[in-house]
Image (cartoon, rainbow, N blue to C red):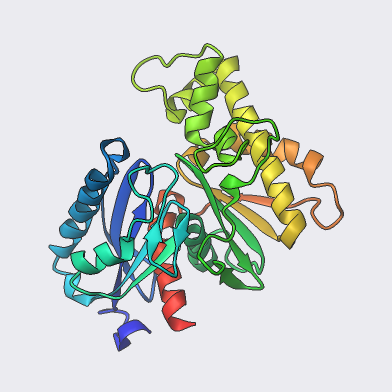
Amino acid sequence: MLGGQSVDGQALVLAVDIGGTKIAGALVGAEDGVLHCRTERPTRAAEGGQAVLDSLAEVVGRLRGLPEWPRVRLVGVGSAGPVDTLRGTVSPVNIPGWRDFPLLRELDRLTDGLPGVLTGDGVAMAAAEHWRGAARGFDNALCMVVSTGVGGGLVLGGALYPGPTGNAGHIGHITVDLEGEPCPCGSRGCLELLASGTAIARHAVAAGWRPRSGAAGAAAVAESARDGDPRALAAFARAGQALAAGIAATATLVELDVVVIGGGVAQSGDLLLGPLRARLAEYATLPYVRGLRIESAALATDAGLVGAAAAALWAVEK
């Protein structure tokens, strides 16, 4: 038990989830994993690194003003990657203003020295789903975030496996298209370029789809797909096929019991998971990967926050 407090007055973890679209924060129970408070701000990645830091400061400042704040004992932060947990730095592909950004140092300043643990957003999601979600009870799991980007984390042998720098399981940047487009990460044909929300919208627009109103994002594509628009359906089918290829490759390497899919784009449900499951059999052909179980994340968009807390608790208690 972190801090030696009872469940009724349990210690809390300041959890922060940093993505390309939003920065979310919450106070999470160290005993029950329940979010007691939650807030978020736009990431403002297009405005530069200082704007992103300002958004982070607003999130932390809002939570510091709550009466529960004195019970916070630990900071857990999950960030879009890559991350470097050894140095406490992040270089998110979708936040170009942060390269080798000293995130833990800044959080130390914003929280007046509370101990902090950094993890990748995919690893955070794996920690959350293994603690309280769809991967609970499974010894070997890949948990994926499909959102502005695509991330992932692994549970192997019943324990979280972040790897030496915190990036193990970062499935979004494995190559699934040998002749594909260059990726901001420096590689080519990455899964993220085909299966992220950004990629789905881009592919639909290139095929001639247009939103009825508002922004041409993945949510708008999903709305059209539900109405039967063939261009929108094709964009989701392409993303599902790419995910199937990446998942099968990962399962072939490490042997998995279950794959859990979460993140904002995964909220589209069968629009994404239907083609994924249908195409998986074409790629997962060896006996030990056939019939791989695919589940929707149980914690939905709160997985990043619960996971940031879970990964931090795991790190300090292991």
Q: Residue furthest top?
A: 208
Residue 117, image quadrant: bottom left
Vertical order, 101 against 70 (above or below): above
Residue 112, image quadrant: bottom left
- Residue 87: x and y in percent read 40, 68
- Residue 27: x and y in percent read 28, 65
Quadrant containing the N terminus is: bottom left
Q: Nearer the viewer, residue 174 or 221?
A: 174
Q: Nearer the viewer, residue 95 or 151?
A: 95
Q: Is residue 265 left or right of residue 27?
A: right
Q: Is residue 183 left or right of residue 258?
A: left
Query: Residue at coordinates 25% horizontally, 62% vertically from top-left?
Result: 106
Q: Nearer the viewer, residue 41 or 165?
A: 165
Residue 73, image quadrant: bottom left
Vertical order, 246 against 124 (above or below): above
Vertical order, 301 against 158 (above or below): above
- Residue 274: x and y in percent read 65, 35
Query: Residue at coordinates 35% horizontally, 82% vertically from top-left?
Result: 2
- Whether residue 161 appears in this view of the structure is yes
- Whether residue 35 appears in this view of the structure is no
Q: Is residue 97 left or right of residue 227?
A: left
Query: Residue at coordinates 36% horizontally, 52% vertically from top-left?
Result: 18
- Residue 223: x and y in percent read 47, 24
Query: Residue at coordinates 31% horizontally, 49% vertically from top-left?
Result: 23
Q: Is residue 94 left or right of residue 280?
A: left
